[in-house]
Image (tube, rainbow, N blue to C red):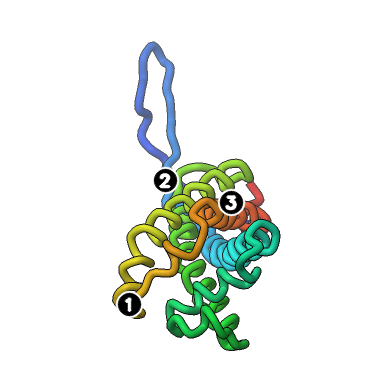
């Protein structure tokens, strides 16, 4: 299979005592060599978003007996639908919660896709999972500290995210999101023949 990358020979760099070294530079960029990688990151991020919800729902089903196991979904939906869904949820509550969660996951998986398409490292499972861990921690900091509280205050005049959800499980869910995104990216990324 012929490669679309042009190879341009470079003039010998070092000539000492009849010893010469020649280098070849590849033109075309890593992004062109990694077609399909960005789409794989987007799909991986959507699955990571579902893992995020799974960790939340599991935590509330097992550890938090005073609240319903769907409580995290209610809190997410209250971002768009208001505080009424915290007490009396409908099917729309859960649909809106999953859609909002997956939209945020789409944004973060786009950031992950940009990272892996433009990265200098060779993608492999350990590298992708560690990059995903960084993604999850960045999402936890940016989303739960910088964005969600002010937007909740502006849109709904309340902040159930900080008052009604456990911070430890929030961090665990974000770590699960990032590491799952990295793992699924390794599963779905296109393989090269080299």
Near mark 2 (Cα within 10 A), the count class, few <14, some 14-19 or many ≥20, is few
Name the disc covering residue 8, or none. 2
Q: Image quarter for residue 64?
A: bottom right
The image shows residue 173 at horizontal and vertical percentages of 56, 57
Calculate the distance from the C-alpha at mark 3 to the C-alpha at mark 2: 39 Å
Near mark 3 (Cα within 10 A), the count class, few <14, some 14-19 or many ≥20, is many
Q: Image quarter for residue 48?
A: bottom right
Q: Are marks 3 and 2 in contact (CB under 8 Å)?
A: no
Which residue lies at the image location 41% right of the left edge and 60% below the top edge? 144
Name the disc covering residue 76, or none. none
Given residues 62 and 126, the one toward you in this image is 62
Say which label, 1 or 2, has the lower sequence index. 2
Given residues 131 and 51, the one toward you in this image is 51
Q: Which residue is label 3 attached to? A: 179
Vertical side of 146 occupied by 94: above or below:
below
In the image, which is nearer the foreground, mark 1 or mark 2?
Answer: 1
Q: Are marks 1 and 2 in contact (CB under 8 Å)?
A: no
Near mark 1 (Cα within 10 A), the count class, few <14, some 14-19 or many ≥20, is few
Which residue lies at the image location 44% right of the left edge and 57% below the top edge? 139
Residue at disc 1, secondary structure: loop
Which residue lies at the image location 36% right of the left edge and 34% below the top edge? 11
Q: Image quarter for residue 46?
A: bottom right
Given residues 43 and 16, the one toward you in this image is 43
The image shows residue 69 at horizontal and vertical percentages of 65, 69
Q: In this image, 137 relative to 130: left or right?
A: left
In the image, which is nearer the foreground, mark 1 or mark 3?
Answer: 1
Vertical side of 89 occupied by 112: above or below:
above
């Amino acid at each position: 299979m012929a490669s679309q990358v042009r190879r341009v020979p470079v003039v010998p760099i070092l000539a000492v005592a009849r010893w010469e070294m020649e280098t070849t530079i590849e033109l075309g960029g890593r992004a062109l060599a990694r077609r399909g990688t960005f789409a794989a990151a987007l799909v991986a991020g959507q699955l990571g978003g579902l893992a995020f919800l799974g960790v939340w729902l599991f935590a509330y089903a097992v550890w938090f007996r005073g609240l319903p196991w769907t409580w995290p979904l209610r809190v997410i939906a209250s971002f768009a639908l208001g505080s009424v869904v915290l007490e009396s949820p409908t099917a729309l509550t859960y649909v809106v919660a999953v859609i909002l969660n997956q939209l945020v996951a789409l944004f973060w998986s786009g950031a992950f896709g940009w990272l892996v398409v433009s990265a200098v490292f060779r993608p492999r499972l350990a590298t992708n999972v560690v990059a995903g861990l960084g993604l999850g921690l960045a999402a936890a900091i940016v989303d739960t500290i910088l964005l969600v509280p002010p937007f909740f205050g502006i849109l709904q005049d309340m902040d159930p995210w900080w008052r009604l959800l456990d911070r430890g499980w929030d961090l665990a869910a974000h770590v699960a999101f990032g590491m799952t995104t990295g793992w699924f990216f390794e599963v779905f990324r296109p393989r090269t023949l080299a």
